[in-house]
Image (spheres, grey):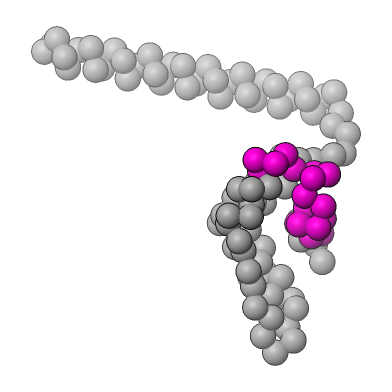
């Protein structure tokens, strides 16, 4: 079993230990079910992983990482988040300027 499937099993068996009550309720509403056909577990796990990716549960699992993140990795992530925020602000500023010009008829 790959690591994502293992984490999913842990999250499904121990919801209060890993997820908050809101996330657990959200996960319960999604209700991902996979039928095992012809005793083929590999195919069922592959299908489960695809369904988890498409529903967003895999993202929740990755966000709930419990291992240590090095300070250098934290700095890199912080820098990337800052750059993403600045790009978004620049885009918003450009769009606002375009809309103001259209409204004023220039």
Percent coordinates x, y for residue 43 in the rendering: 69, 77
Q: How many marks?
A: 0
Which residue: 70% across, 41% down?
21
The residue segment tinted magenta is 6-23
Which residue: 29% across, 12% down?
97
Percent coordinates x, y for residue 7 in the rendering: 80, 54
Q: Residue furthest bottom?
A: 38
* Principal secondary structure, stretch drawn in magenta: helix
Residue 7 visible in image: no
Can residue 65 be found in the magenta stretch?
no
Res 28 quadrant in image: bottom right
Which residue: 68% across, 47% down?
24
| The N terminus - image quarter | bottom right
| The C terminus - image quarter | top left
Q: Residue furthest left?
A: 105
Nearer to me, 56 or 101: 56
Which residue: 55% across, 20% down?
85
Residue 30 falls left or right of residue 87: right
| Above/below status of 50 relative to 74 | below
Percent coordinates x, y for residue 98 in the rendering: 26, 17
Res 69 quadrant in image: top right
Can residue 21 be found in the magenta stretch?
yes
Residue 96 visible in image: yes
Residue 65 falls left or right of residue 68: left
């Amino acid at each position: 079993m790959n690591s994502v499937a293992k984490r999913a099993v842990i999250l499904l068996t121990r919801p209060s230990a890993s997820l908050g009550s809101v996330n657990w309720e959200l996960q319960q509403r999604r209700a991902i079910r996979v039928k095992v056909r012809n005793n083929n577990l590999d195919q069922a796990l592959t299908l489960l992983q695809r369904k988890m990716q498409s529903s967003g549960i895999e993202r929740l699992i990755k966000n709930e990482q419990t291992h240590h993140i090095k300070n250098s990795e934290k700095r890199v992530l912080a820098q990337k988040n800052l750059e993403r925020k600045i790009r978004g602000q620049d885009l918003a500023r450009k769009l606002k300027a375009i809309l103001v010009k259209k409204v004023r008829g220039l």
